[in-house]
Amino acid sequence: MDHRDELRLLRGACAASRTGAWSYRLDEDVVEWTPLLYELFALSEDTELTLEVALSFYVGSSRERVSKAVQRCLSEGAPWNLDVQCRSVTGRMFWARTIGEALVNEGRVVALQGAFQDITRERRAVDDQERAQAELAFVLRTMPDGFFLLDSEWRFSFVNAASEQLMRRNAEDIVGCSIWDEFPGTRGSIIEETYPRVKDTGTSQSIQTYFQPLEAWFDISVHPAQTGIAVHFSDVTQEVGEQRDLRLFRTAIDAMNSGAILLERHTDDITSWLITYANKAVSTLWKTGHHFLVGQEFGRITRNATFSPELSAIQNSLVSLDLCEFELILDRFGHEQIFDGVAVPLTGTNNHCAHAVIIMDDVTERRRMNEERHRSERLALIGQMAGGVSHDFNNLLAVILGNIELLELTDNKQEAAILVGEARDAVMRGKALNDSLLAFAGKSRLKPQTADLGTFMRSLVPLVQRAIPSRITLEIIISEALPPVLIDTAMAESCLLNVVINARESIIGNGTIRIRLDASQHSNPNGEGSQTWVRLAVEDTGCGIPDQLRQHVFEPFFTTRSVGQGSGLGLSRVRGYLEQIGGFVTLSSAVGEGTTVAMFFAVSPVDTRDPDTRDPESSLERIRKLKALVVDDTPAVSQVIARMLNSLGCSTLIASNGGEARDIIMREADLDIVISDVVMPGENGVELARSISIMRPDVRIALMSGYTQDDFLDTYSPSGIAFFSKPVSRAQLMQFVRSSSTTP
C-alpha cells in the first residue's frame, strides 16, 4: 500500500470517527486545523486562528482545564487527553476529546500537535448509562423488599435499606463479609443449596423458607449476576400464617355439621351476590352437588325459600355491618325444610361489606320434636287435672239436673226463675272450665280485650286448685277495685298455669303457693318513667333458682328439669305474651327460700269491657221473621237450637248432615240463615259453609263447635261467617238473628 492509499484510509477513518487534527507553531502563534474542525466549529477554512482564538471555543471549566494543559505541555512537555465541552460560532454545544503533545527540537518545545474528536454521542450514551445506573441504584436502595448482591466469594457487595431491616444488620457491618460467616444459620439449609446452584447454572430460582434465627418466613428469588448472584426477598410471615390459619379454618368449616357459604358482594341486591365457597354440609342440607352451589347467585339457590325476616332486611343488616339471625323455610315439592341461620358481614376496603358468611342449620326435625314434646307435656298435665276437672263437671251437671227436675215440680214463677238462672250459670261455668283447658292445650290465638283481672282470677281458681296437690297450700289474695287491663283471656290463663306449675315443681314436700293480684307502681322497662300496673305475682316456698341459672330462665327451651320432664317454653312464652300486649315479667329468687314471678299488665286507657250480653226479653226489638236451617248430627243439640230460634220468631228447619242440608238449601229459596256444627260425619261444617257461600251468597252462616275457632282459621276464614263455641246461648242466637235481619 503506497502513501496515497494510507492517506485515503486515514482520512476515511477520521471522517467516520468525527476526528480531526491540529497543530500550533509557537514562533508564529498560528493554529492549523484539518477541515473537520472547521466544520465542527462552523468556521470557514480561510479563518486565521491563533491560540487564544482556538481556546475561546471551550466552555466554562473546560477552557481552564485545556489552558492549563497547554501551559504544562509548553513548559514541561507533558501531553494531555481531556474530555471537554465546546461551543461553535453558531452556539451549538457539543462534547469533544482533545489530545495534545509537544514537538521538541534541541531540547526546546517548538510546536504542539494533536487530535480533536467529537464525542457527543458517546458522552450522551455514557450519561444515559450513568443516569440509568443511578436510578437503578436508587430503586434498589429504596425498594420496600430486601435486595443484596453477593460476589463470587459469597461476600456482600451491596445491601439495600430494606435488607438492613429484614436481616436486622447494618449494611456497613456486613458489606465485604461472607454470608455464611455473618449468617451461620444458612449453613445446611435450602439457602445454601439454592445460591450455588443459581451461580453454577445461571438459572433463576425462587424458594420459600423459614429462617429460624430471624423467626420469620421469607419468599426468596435468586438471579445470576455478573460477579455472583442477586437476591430479592420479602418477609411473608403474616401471609404464611394467614394461609395456614385459612387452611385450618376451612378444614374446621368443612368438618362442621352446619352449612356455611361465603358470598361475594357485587351490587346492593343480595340476590345477585355470588357464592364463592360452600362447605360439604351445605351440599348435604341443600341436597345438591357442590359444583351447583359455587359460582351461583344467592338468589338462584333460594328462589323457593321464604326468609324471616325478609331477604331485604338481611341485606340491610349486612350492608350496615350488623349480623342478622333469620329463619329460612325451603319448599321441596310440598315438603317444608326449616333452617335457622345467621348472616355475618365481612369488611373490605373502605370499611364496607365486601363479603358475607351465611351459616345454616336444618332444624326441621328439632322443631317437630319440640312441638311434639310441648304437646305431650300439655296433654300430660291435662291428664293430671282430669280427675279434678271431672269432679267439677259432675258438680255442675248435678246442679243442672237437679234444677231441671225441680222445675218440673214447681209452679212458682219466682222459684222457677231462680232454678233457671242457677242452671244457666252452671252451664257457663262448665263452658269457662272447658275453654281454660283448650287454652292451656294451645288451642287459641291471641285476642286482646279489656278485662277485669279480679274477675278473671276468681273464675280461674277451680282450675288452679286442680293443678296443685293437697300437700301444697294455695293462697289467693285479690285487691278490690283494680283498673281494667288489656289481656287475651285464654293466653293469660295458659301463662298463669305455666307459672303455677313451675312453682309446684319447685316445692319438694309441703309448701305454699301464694297468688297475689294488686296495683303496683313500677318503672316502665322502656325507660318512660314510673306508672301504674296491675301485678299478678306467683310466690312459692320452693328450692329457688341459683344465680348462674337465673339469667337463662326466660330463654326458649331452657329448663332445669330432666329430659322429657319439661320443654323450657313456659317462662319464655309468658314473657313473649306480656311483651306483645305491652307488659313485662320479673323474677326474683333465693336458693332455699323460694321464687316470685310477677306479671305486669298495662292499665287500659279506655274501658271497653262488654256489658252483659244477656238481653232481657223486653229489650228484644221487633225484627222481620227469618227462615233458619240448623245442621247437627246430634238430634238433641239441633232440637234445642231450633227451639231457641223459634222463640226468637224464626221458622226453623233441621238437617242431620251436609247432604240433607244441601237438599233443603236447593229447595228453600227463601232461606235466610244456616247454623251448622263443624264436626260431622262425611261433609263437615267448614266444607258445607264453603259450598253455601258459593251457592247462596245471600245466606248468613254461623258455625258452632266444642273446639275453638282457631282450629279452623287456617283452613277457612271468610268474612261474614259467625262462630259460636258450644254450648250456644239464646243471647248469642238473638244477636246473630238481629244482625241477620238488618243485613240487606
Image (cartoon, rainbow, N blue to C red):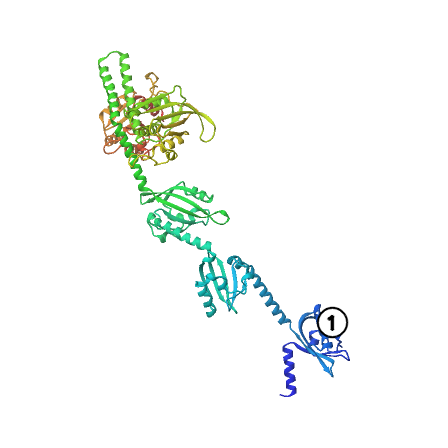
Rendered view: 288 above or below 744: below
Rendered view: 298 above or below 547: below
Q: Quadrant of residue 742?
A: top left
Position of residue 248 measured from the top left corner of the image (x, y, whole percent): 39, 52
Nearer to the camera, 240 or 612: 240
Nearer to the camera, 610 or 433: 433
Residue 286 visible in image? yes
Residue 22 visible in image? no
Rendered view: 98 above or below 204: below
Q: Which residue is the site of mark 1? A: 56
**What is the tally of numbered marks visible in this picture?**
1
Residue type pointed to by label 1? Ser
Position of residue 273 measured from the top left corner of the image (x, y, whole percent): 43, 49
Extreme-right residue of the structure: 28
Question: From the image, which quarter does the C terminus lie in?
Answer: top left
Question: From the image, which quarter does the N terminus lie in?
Answer: bottom right
Extreme-top residue of the structure: 412
Position of residue 197 measured from the top left corner of the image (x, y, whole percent): 45, 68
Rendered view: 352 above or below 151: above
Residue at (44%, 55%) from the top-left corner?
A: 240
Q: Quadrant of residue 706?
A: top left
Query: Taking 536 as reference, is 31 left or right?
Result: right
- Crowdedness near tag 1: few (<14), some (14–19) or many (≥20) residues, C-alpha within 10 Å: some
Query: Taking 155 as reference, is 598 left or right?
Result: left
Position of residue 646 measured from the top left corner of the image (x, y, whole percent): 27, 21
Nearer to the camera, 608 or 462: 462
Task: Label 1: state its secondary structure.
Answer: loop
Q: Quadrant of residue 120?
A: bottom right
